[in-house]
Each structure stands twice: as structure tokens, then as C-alpha cells.
Image (spheres, helix red, strand yellow):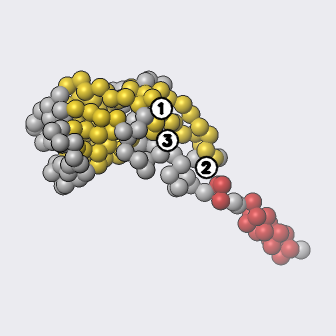
Amino acid sequence: MKFFLTVLTSLLLLISCSTDDDVCTGGEGTPRVKIKFKTFATGKPRTLDSVFVAVDYGSGPVTVVQNTVKTDSLLLPLRVEDLPFTDVFVATSRTGPVSRVRLNYTTSTEYVSPACGIRRLYTGLSADLQQPDPVLGVETAQNEIVNESKTHLFLLF
């Protein structure tokens, strides 16, 4: 009888597990903004030798990227509370000038699954360059941030 109860309990545990209970690993979470770089004069894609990025999530700038190797793009998380903007600070050296770019958007939420919960989506994306040098301009490529596969923003150097 004990053997039967053990087998029955084991079967019930195996049957009750499903893929919906797995950890959210398929990219269904809140998407990050994808930023690439261009040359201001020509508009051609550009690779930066180094880039330093800080983002203000509400309590002052927090360094999120300290990249001293060549890179052509960045993925940055945005604010998840109900404020309609995120300030991004960009520099090409540790001690050089810092540009401030304000990303404006409208937020909405979407239920994904029991494992992933709710994710934040951003629509109506626009960017204002509030402090130039080293960034000389900003171009919006996509006005919706619903996934990370497409470039959303270009910074012009």
C-alpha cells in the first residue's frame, strides 16, 4: 500500500509540472531600448572605441555601461514606474564631456504568463538631446519598444 501511495504521489507531482511554470527565459520580459551609433556628418553607421552610459532611474544617474572595447550598439533598461521619461547620460571617455538624452514615451502593461508576470511596453518613443557634446544629434528609428530585435534609437557622433 505504501508503494502504491508513493508511486501515485510521484505521478501526480510529475503531471502537475508544466512548461508554464518554468522561469521566463524566452525574452518575454520588459524590453530594453536598443541604441546604435551613426556619424553626424554622413549618417553612416559608426563603431565607438569606448562608451560610458549612466541612466537615471529616479535616484540619480547609475552607471550601466563602462565599455572600453569597440561597440556598435547598446541595450539599456528604461524606468518601469509610471513616469513618462528616462534620462540617459552618454560619454566617450571616463573624464570627458557627458551628453544628456531624455527618452520620452507612454507606458502600458501586458500580462505574459504566471512565470513571467507582467511586462512594461513603451510607445510613442521620442528623444530630446538636452546637453550636446559628445552626442551631436538623436534619431528615432522605432517609436515602439515591444521587443529588442529592432534598433529604436540612433545617437549621432
- SS class of the residue under badge 3? loop
The amino acid pointed to by label 2 is Ala
Instruction: Kindly report the distance in space between the C-alpha atoms of the residues bearing marks 3 and 1.
Output: 8 Å
From this view, report whether residue 114 is shown above or below residue 10.
above
Residue under pointer 2: 115
One can see residue 41 in this view? yes
Q: Observer-nearest residue: 40 or 111?
A: 40
Residue under pointer 3: 146
Q: Nearer the viewer, mark 2 or mark 1?
A: 1
One can see residue 67 in this view? no
Residue under pointer 1: 123
- SS class of the residue under badge 2? loop
Q: Nearer the viewer, mark 2 or mark 3?
A: 3
Q: Quadrant of the N terminus?
A: bottom right
Q: Observer-nearest residue: 60 or 102?
A: 102
The amino acid pointed to by label 3 is Val
